[in-house]
Amino acid sequence: MKILQRYILKELLLNFCFTLTVITSVFFIAVSVQTLYRFQQLSFLFVLQILPQFVPYSLAYTIPMSAMIGVVLTYGRLSADHEITAMRTSGMHLWQVLTPSILIGLFTVVVCFVLQANVIPYCQYKKRTITKDAVARLIADLDTETDVALGNFRMSWEKRDEEGRFHKLLLLFEDPKEGASFKFIANSGLVYVDQGILRFTLSGVHTFLDRSRGSSSRTKKSSSGEPISPFFREKIKPKPDLQTENLVSASDDLVAGDIGARNRSQESSRTFSELGEFEGGLEIETIFPSSISRRKLREFPIADLLHKQSLTTDPLEIAEIQTELQMRYSLSLAGLCFVLIGTPLGILFRRGNRLGAFLVSFLLIMTLYYPLLMFGEAFGETGRLHPVLAVWSANIVLGSIGLTMLFAVLRQ
């Protein structure tokens, strides 16, 4: 019997490895093209450095999917060729036939947990630091170019002198989420990167706020009461004789600092202000909102998250940390749930109709598991549901369906 189990396990591993290679390669090519497009003005060395950081994140999703496809292909072929019937006729119990698939599922749990616990958080941190360094090098070497575009940030100028000052400088930050843009037009100024902040020291400044594509959102506060992700670190220094209350922020998420009293009741979608001098900074994280982020919870290893949870008393922050922890545990167990779905479907779809088994299991995962997981994450982070119940509902539902089908196969 062990010989037959090794025979099944060998075919399972071959199908699993082949599927994992194909799916991960396709995902990696898609990410590579997207990265090259998004960071066109950064060096090719930057692309070579940042692309490997996407591999662990992609494996966390492709490994469970590959395990599901592997068991569907393996048990579908065994069922179509009546090999399972022959094994049972020789005295082999069906549980022994299914043991290799359970081993594959447990293997994916271990690998995915290691990825979620330490590897992916480290790669998230590395992506952020690599991007900051690349932007710093790009800004430092802006001698021949006359414009640069980085994510939501645009910068153009007429010339740069020997001291490194830009003349006739235009800085533009766009916030697609809020539908607003904030523009600086300066006679001259210095632009440089310092500790992850793109800093500006400008003179002869005019500012222009355009909210015509959307409305300013209400102030979003973190659990500590501070504005979330402000990109102005320094204070605006207007001329003494100028009124600053007309300088309205595109979003309180974006603008922070001592800019005087704000006219929150202003109805105009465009605001123009004149400033003599300006010193400020733009966090590089806000330039690439979809690619790098501040040191959020996903950058902390599980051990650090548990320590952070023990230090806080804020209920909302505790809910966010618990949700992040449960998400990692739940995603680690996804491979076993997928195997429980794929194995009985591969056996039940006879006559070699493995494509039908794959489509059914794929639809269950994409239309049921991941939507439930996303809704659970949203409800858990906001405290509407307990994080354990919110996040694990997807695994409970999919695992229940898989076990039900598995026992149906055993009864046959």
Image (tube, rainbow, N blue to C red):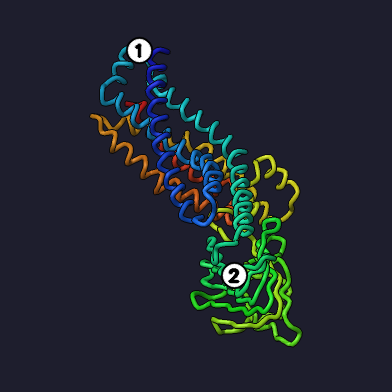
Helix, strand or loop at disc 2? strand
Instruction: Check disc 1 and report the residue beneath it.
Output: 91
Q: Report if residue 347 is visible in the image.
A: yes
Q: Amino acid at mark 2?
A: Lys
Residue 207 in percent (x, y) is at 62, 78
Left or right? Give the position of 85 relative to 336.
left
* Mark nearer the N terminus (1 vs 2): 1
In front: 238, or 43? Answer: 43
As drawn, 255 above or below 70: below
State how far apart marks 1 and 2 are (Cα).
84 Å
- Give the residue at x 54% y 77%: 210
Q: Is disc 2 surrounded by few (<14), some (14 to 19) or many (20+) residues within 10 Å?
A: some
- Give the residue at x 56% y 69%: 156
In front: 348, or 219? Answer: 219
Mark 1 against mark 2, which lies toward the viewer?
Answer: 2
As drawn, 215 above or below 81: below
Residue 95 in percent (x, y) is at 41, 22
Q: Quadrant of residue 20?
A: top left
In front: 63, or 250? Answer: 250
Label disc, if present, on residue 159 of the rendered structure: 2
Q: Report if residue 403 is visible in the image.
A: no
- Quarter of the image containing the N terminus? top left
Residue found at the very far bottom of the displayed protein: 241
Q: Amino acid at mark 1?
A: Gly
Helix, strand or loop at disc 1? loop
As drawn, 164 above or below 34: below
Contact (Cβ within 8 Å) of mark 1 with mark 2: no
In front: 391, or 225? Answer: 225
- Give the residue at x 55% y 72%: 181
- Give the residue at x 40% y 12%: 3
Q: Is disc 1 surrounded by few (<14), some (14 to 19) or many (20+) residues within 10 Å?
A: few
